[in-house]
Amino acid sequence: MNTALWIVQILLGLVFVGAGIMKSTQPKEKLQGTMKWVEDFSPSTVKVIGVLELLAGIGLILPWVTGILPVLTPLAAVGLVLTMVGAIITHIRRGEAPFTVVNLVLLLLAAFVAYGRFVAVPFGAA
């Protein structure tokens, strides 16, 4: 179980660090080409979402690896679950239901990490 959690944590971490860097550094106009949902949000809101995704991506890995505040890892996963709930709601509201599949997969993977690190393999049990 610990190995599966690490694989998912690393993959999710890479996905969200990449997405977070893109959203926090690119202008809204450039993002609109591939992310139509940004039309509904201010540039500062898109940047905040990006920074939160970046921090959560780092939080999935760094605290658990270093042993410094390892509780931040499952909390980061919970934050990503909530972020994906918001993404799903946004896509459904915009009539972009097919895009929710990716969000749902990411939500389930983040929920797996949250459950795994809070309950199944808590810090020090591995």
Image (spheres, rainbow, N blue to C red):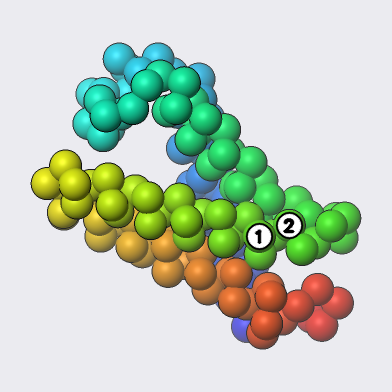
Answer left or right for 96 relative to 39. Answer: left
Whether residue 64 is visible here, answered yes or no, is no
Q: Give the percent coordinates (x, y) of residue 109.
A: 47, 67
Q: Give the percent coordinates (x, y) of residue 46.
A: 42, 28
Q: Give the percent coordinates (x, y) of residue 41.
A: 33, 27
Image: 115 above or below 110:
below
Residue labelled with disc 1: 75
Q: Amino acid at mark 1?
A: Leu
Where residue 94 is drawn, which disc sits there?
Answer: none
Residue labelled with disc 2: 72
As measured in the structure, the alpha-carbon distance from the residue carrying label 1 to the one carrying label 2 is: 5 Å
Q: Amino acid at mark 2?
A: Leu
| Residue contact at pointers 1 and 2, CB within 8 angstroms | yes
What is the crowding at mark 1: few (fewer than 14 residues within 10 Å), some, or many (at least 20)? Answer: some
* Residue at left offset 40%, top offset 54%: 84
User: In what element is the residue under mark 1?
Assistant: helix
